[in-house]
Amino acid sequence: MLFHDEEAMLFCMHCQKETLHDIQYMNEIISSIECTECHNQMSIDIDAMNQFYHYLYERLVSKPGRLTEEARQDFSKFLATMPMRIISKPMRFTNEYNQMNKEVKDYVSRVKQDEDQND
């Protein structure tokens, strides 16, 4: 998953106490941290498109290894599901690509809006 959120107890410089924070990740890199009490937010400038392409590249490069592992675990199931997977994979990849591309574009526009508000 390209984007995901986690929560953690961190010391808030604005509240001057330990509070719950929402941490947003993009491709395992922290993109922002927000205090859930005072909503003070710190954003980290990330090249979203670069991270998106890196994520896709890693998924494509690791696919042969993941398929090999599946074949080792249960070869008969692997062979039985392969014809349908070969047919459906291009459609599933296209859907995943379109969804992630939309998320990246939304992220970039959100960052741009935040920068405009801060100016």
Image: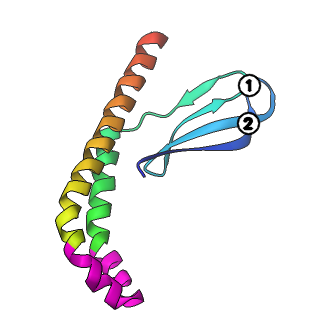
Image-quadrant location for residue 67: bottom left
* Left or right placement of residue 57 versus residue 40 in this view: left
Residue sitting nearer the eye, 116 or 8: 8
Q: Name the spot of residue 11 as percent of width and height, x first.
A: 76, 36
Q: What residue span does the magenta drawing correspond to?
A: 64-83
- Look at the magenta stretch and give its main secondary structure: helix
Q: Say which element carries label 2.
A: strand
**Dot 2, crowdedness within 10 Å: few (<14), some or many (≥20)?**
some
Residue type marked 1:
Glu
Residue 37: assigned label: 1
Picture mark count: 2
Asked if the residue at tag 1 contacts the one at tag 2, i.e. Cβ–Cβ closer than 8 Å, the answer is yes
Residue type marked 2:
Leu
Q: Could you tell which of marks 2 and 1 lies nearer the N-terminus?
A: 2
Image-quadrant location for residue 6: top right
Residue 47: assigned label: none
* Left or right placement of residue 26 versus residue 34 in this view: left
User: In this figure, which residue is indicated by the disc labeled 2?
Assistant: 20
Q: Name the spot of residue 10 as percent of width and height, x first.
A: 73, 39
Q: What residue is drawn where x is 43% and y is 50%?
A: 27
Q: What residue is drawn where x is 68% and y is 29%?
A: 35
Does 73 lie within the magenta span? yes
Q: Say which element carries label 1.
A: loop
* Left or right placement of residue 51 versus residue 13 in this view: left
**Dot 1, crowdedness within 10 Å: few (<14), some or many (≥20)?**
few
Q: What residue is drawn where x is 31% and y is 42%?
A: 99
Q: Name the spot of residue 94 as percent of width and height, x first.
A: 21, 51
